[in-house]
Image: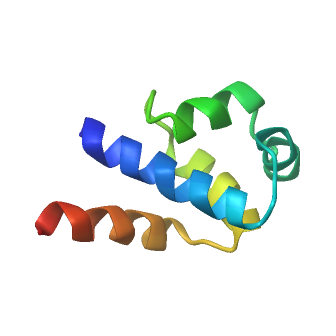
């Protein structure tokens, strides 16, 4: 489970950085608190589906894509 949370956080962080956004900017755009975003990107806590949706949407990601990305690496 910890591995999955870290991979979700890494996927979100990589996409955010690719788009040139700071954590504070994504937090503001998504309506998620900065600390919450930091915890998700750091693989800490247990973000709800609602939180993941709020973060993924402005990044042009779907929760399904984020989860599929992590699942592929675990299957290998």
Q: Residue furthest left?
A: 76
Q: Position of residue 14 (x, y in %)?
A: 59, 58
The residue depicted at 50 percent of the width and 42 percent of the height is 48
x and y, in percent, of residue 31 in the image: 82, 44
Residue drawn at (24%, 40%) of the image:
1
Quarter of image, res 74: bottom left
Image: 9 above or below 53: above
Q: Toward which corner of the image does residue 61 lie, by quadrant? A: bottom right
Q: Position of residue 44 (x, y in %)?
A: 45, 28
Give the percent coordinates (x, y) of residue 24.
84, 38
Residue at 44% across, 71% down: 64
Q: Is residue 55 left or right of residue 67?
A: right
Which of the pair 46/40 is nearer the observer?
40
Please name the colour scheme applied to the rendered image. rainbow
Instruction: Give above or below for 51 relative to 45.
Output: below
Task: Identify the residue at image location x=11%, y=69%.
Answer: 76
Front one among 13 and 49:
13
Is residue 73 toward the left or the right of residue 68 in the image? left
The count of marks equals 0
Is 39 left or right of 70, judged from the image as shown?
Answer: right
């Amino acid at each position: 489970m910890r591995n999955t949370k870290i991979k979700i956080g890494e996927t979100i962080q990589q996409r955010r950085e690719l788009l040139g956004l700071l954590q504070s900017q994504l937090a503001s755009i998504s309506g998620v608190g900065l600390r919450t975003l930091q915890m998700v990107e750091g693989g800490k806590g247990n973000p709800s589906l609602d939180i993941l949706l709020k973060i993924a949407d402005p990044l042009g990601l779907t929760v399904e894509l984020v989860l599929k990305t992590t699942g592929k690496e675990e299957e290998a």
